Amino acid sequence: MLASEIIKRPIITEKSMLLVEELNKYTFSVDKRANKVQIKKAIEELFDVKVTKVNKIKTAPKLKRVGQHTGFKAEVVKAVVTLAKDNTIEIFSA
């Protein structure tokens, strides 16, 4: 798998921005087939940074209803990536 296929998009929420400011942790939506080692290599290749830790979070699909119709929200896999001390990723800075 290519690095651009593994990393889908950054997740920018209030909570993820607090993690960036306080703990140098960045959150990305990733492919559900990728493992932690592949995620680490993809981040290091795409953004030219040193990754120290990767936490992978898999959310279960949730049942949703609209009137009589039922369906599921999509399964989302997120990766919280901790970078080395002096590294940053520019797309998260405003």
Image: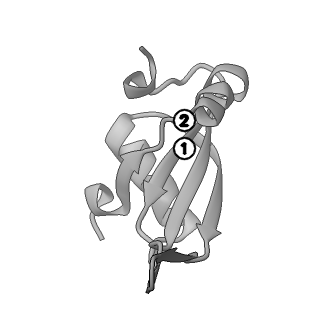
Quadrant in which the C terminus appears: top left
Camera-nearest residue between 65 and 24: 65
Camera-nearest residue between 50 and 33: 33
Question: How is this picture coloured?
Answer: one colour
Rendered location of residue 1, percent (x, y): 30, 71
Mark 2 secondary-structure assignment: loop
Camera-nearest residue between 24 and 37: 24
Q: CA distance from mark 2 to mark 1?
A: 9 Å
Camera-nearest residue between 18 and 34: 18
Q: Which residue occupies 48% across, 35% down?
A: 12
Q: Which mark is residue 13?
A: 2
Q: Do the CB atoms of the residues marked 2 and 1 lie less than 8 Å apart? A: yes
Residue closest to the far front: 67
Q: Toward which corner of the image does residue 87 lie, by quadrant?
A: top right
Q: Which residue occupies 54% across, 35% down?
A: 13
Q: Of callouts 2 and 1, which one flags the residue occurring earlier in the amino acid sequence?
A: 2
The mark closer to the camera, 2 or 1, is 2
Residue type, mark 1 in image: Thr
Q: Which residue occupies 67% across, 31% down?
A: 19
Q: Which mark is residue 54?
A: none
Mark 1 secondary-structure assignment: strand
Rendered location of residue 37, percent (x, y): 54, 64
Residue identified by numbered label 1: 27
Q: Which residue occupies 27% across, 55% down?
A: 4
